Amino acid sequence: MTSFNPPDTTTMPLPEATPAYSPRWRTRLYSIAGLALLLGVVMVVASAMGSTHIPIGTIWEVLVSQLPFTDIHAWPDATETIILDIRLPRVMLAGLVGAALAVAGATYQGLFRNPLADPYLIGVAQGAALGAVVGFLLPWSVAGLSLIPALAFVGALMAVAVVYSIARVGKTLPVTTLILAGVALGAFLGSITSYLMIISGERLHGIIAWLMGRFSLSNWEQVWMIAAPCVIGVVFIWLYARPLNVMQLDEEQAQQLGINVERVKLILLVAATLITAAAVSFVGTIGFVGIIVPHAVRLIWGPDHRFLLPLTTFAGAGFLILADTAARTMLAPTEIPVGVITAFFGAPFFLYLLRHKKRAVF
């Protein structure tokens, strides 16, 4: 009988099996429901905050008034406009982007078995940044629409496609080669972006604002354009939670347990890349969300992807909504780039979790 060799301790261990309906399962299911409820509360509170304070009760009434067969209108028209046309689309967009980046980060960390992996590891951010800068410099638009989001999305996908084609060896995709190719191509694209920024002239301020992340131009059109790929991609990744758990073993052992490793790699890479590209195309390359949120969830609830991915989705959405609310209210009427907020508040919180949680999860 062949002996079983445990995986290297430098990689994430396969989460321990938990019987159905055990106390741990119930606790985690309650946690998912609780985070979803908390996310709803955060969205309402964020919609109430701003230069014009709106009572939370009024927020609820305005939202309920949009339902069929309801006739409530006890507030000024300006209040309804502020809620439905300005704040609510911004909150929704921040939630979608936060969920997409957090889930993509958790996917890359599980796929690469690397706690430092983030959604931008294999060139997504650099490709999106280069596409966006080119969009800023082009003097025209299409049908009155800016080319910046479209070029950012295409740039992100093209960068990952190049990295994938370089790293692929026959029918296999070595993870180390993929990461190294991503780092190398990212440095190359970053140098081109830097050069274009130097020659951008008066457009430099807008480019820097985009690169640091912003939700100030949010509208319902952007929400609907991002919602479809993000929601579909996130749910699709949820369905691969069990294969991700098995792949925390080395690839050979995962193959022996019935996982088509190369197929799972490709599917998860494509799904995570698509939701990341969609997320950054309108709002810029917001950093730290894809590292902080999956780590925080893993430290609190454990590494089982069946729970980690849904928990990360709701936590990521809530985290970025709160960060954007702080960005637009802390120094109002001046708005702070949301990327500054995610790093400023996220890093200390993560260090606090690392200090006070004793169990190892990697």
Image (tube, rainbow, N blue to C red):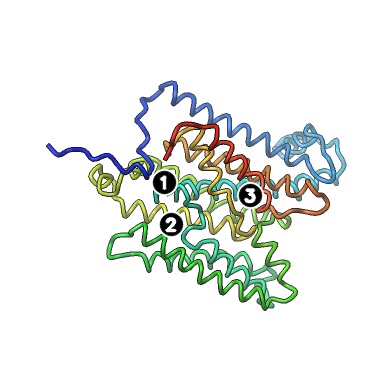
Residue 110: which numbered mark, if any?
Answer: 1
Label 1 to label 2, Cα distance in Å? 15 Å
How many residues crowd around disc 3 within 10 Å: few (fewer than 14), some, or many (20 or more)? Answer: some
- Which residue corresponds to the image point at 33% horizontal and 41% vertical from the top-left? 246
> Is the residue 55 above or below the residue 260 in the image?
above
Q: Are marks 1 and 3 in contact (CB under 8 Å)?
A: no
Mark 2 is on which residue type?
Answer: Val
Dot 2 or dot 3, earlier in sequence: 2
Badge 2, how many Cα within 10 Å: few under 14, some, many 20+?
Answer: some
Q: Residues within 10 Å of mark 1 (few under 14, many from 20)?
A: many
What is the CA distance from the residue labelled 1 to the residue labelled 3?
Answer: 22 Å
Residue at point 65% right, 35% down? 40
Disc number for residue 343 = 3
Dot in front, 2 or 3: 3
**Sequence-first tag of 1 and 2:** 1
Q: Is residue 103 left or right of residue 209?
A: left
In the rendered view, tell whether residue 260 sits above or below residue 152: above
In the picture of the structure, the residue carrying the numbered disc 2 is 270
In the image, residue 199 sits, relative to residue 246, either above or below, namely below
Q: Quadrant of residue 322?
A: top right
Q: Position of residue 316 (x, y in %)?
A: 58, 43
Query: Spatial distance from mark 2 to mark 3, Cα to Cα?
Result: 27 Å
Tags 1 and 2 touching, CB below 8 Å: no
User: Which mark lies nearer to you, 1 or 3?
Assistant: 3
Instruction: Residue 24: give its label.
Output: none
144 or 35, which lies in front?
A: 35
Quarter of the image where one finds residue 54: top right
> Mark 2 near mark 3, Cβ–Cβ under 8 Å?
no
- The residue at the point 69 percent across, 76 percent down is 200
Identify the amino acid type marked 1. Answer: Gly
Tell me which label, 1 or 3, sits earlier in the chain: 1
The outermost residue toward the front is: 355
